[in-house]
Image: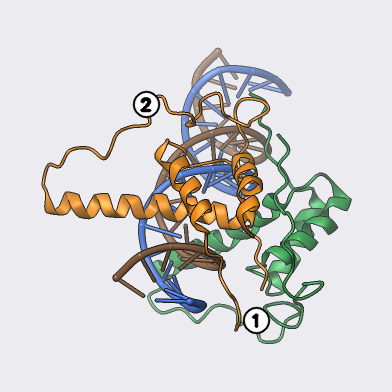
Chain colours: A orange, B green, C blue, D brown
DNA sequence: GCAAATTAATGATTTATTCAAG
DNA sequence: CTTGAATAAATCATTAATTTGC
């Protein structure tokens, strides 16, 4: 019943994927908030869209990895650990103080 | 490191439990928002606290039921379906206007 | 009685599973 | 079939009960 779902614009998608590749796989709510604000420049977007995107992307990434592991008994490790990317608990933490309290979830229109 | 977690006041807890008993076991975000507003009269509280409370309460309710089922192979079905309680996806939809612009529900203290 | 040690509750997060739009 | 949305289950972490030795 007309529950159109969000679809990332190419720009938005690129940015998201880039962040993910750079090691931001599990943003806290504050980061999600910032990303949402940023991406809203390229089209309608909500907090939950960004939140879900990362959830799903990470989950399905792992799924893929597990499937490959089933086929190749001993495959090389995935691309590479974040090492020292721009994100990943680095200084880009939008936490005002350390030990982020973290998140929560959705809000839906219904 | 002073990451005190939320603790419902007796009043808040009573209200939550009452809603749950009345059939509101899975409030949508809008309902959570309203409940949060209401409960904030009795003490500090955030959207996510309410959200988590229902999640946990429902989950642990089911846990209890499953445990009992393990002991009694064929127990009578749980109390009764909500039938026509005050909540439960009824007309109680709290949307102020259709297709809510979304807003912002996740306030985090930080 | 009273703390230190253990255990039980429960708030908070993460991960897995499922549903449904397109 | 892909992927956004939502729910459920599993897990982590902290606080409250409680047990225990003194």
- Which residue lies at the image location 73% right of the left edge and 38% below the top edge? B109
Q: In which quarter of the image is residue A84?
A: top left
Viewer-side residue, B56 vs C14? C14
**Label 1: element kind:** loop
Quarter of the image with the N terminus of chain A in it: bottom right
The chain under label 2 reads A
1 or 2: mark nearer the eye: 2
Q: Residue furthest right?
A: B41
- Which residue lies at the image location 66% right of the left edge and 47% below the top edge? A37
Viewer-side residue, B48 vs A68? A68
Q: Counting other residues with Cα less than 10 Å from the Cα at mark 1, is it few (<14), some (14-19), or many (20 or more)? A: some
Viewer-side residue, A14 vs D2? A14
**Which residue is the site of mark 1?**
B82
Q: In which quarter of the image is residue A108?
A: bottom right
Judged left or right of residue C14, residue B96 is: right
Residue A83: mark: 2
Judged left or right of residue B77, residue C12 is: right
Judged left or right of residue A19, residue A2 is: right
**Label 2: element kind:** loop
Circles 1, 2 touching at the beta carbon (< 8 Å): no
Q: Distance between the residues labelled 1 and 2?
A: 52 Å
User: Is A3 above or below relative to A20?
Assistant: below
Q: Position of residue A17 (x, y in %)?
A: 44, 47
């Amino acid at each position: 019943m007309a529950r159109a779902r969000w679809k990332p614009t190419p720009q938005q998608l690129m940015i998201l994927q880039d962040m993910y590749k750079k090691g931001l796989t599990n943003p806290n709510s504050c980061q999600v908030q910032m990303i949402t604000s940023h991406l809203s420049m390229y089209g309608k977007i909500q907090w939950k869209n960004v939140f879900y995107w990362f959830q799903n992307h990470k989950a399905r990434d792992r799924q893929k990895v597990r499937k490959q592991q089933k086929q190749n008994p001993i495959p090389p490790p995935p691309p590479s650990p974040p090492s020292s990317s721009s994100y990943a608990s680095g200084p880009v933490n939008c936490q005002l103080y350390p030990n982020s309290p973290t998140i929560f979830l959705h809000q839906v229109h219904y």
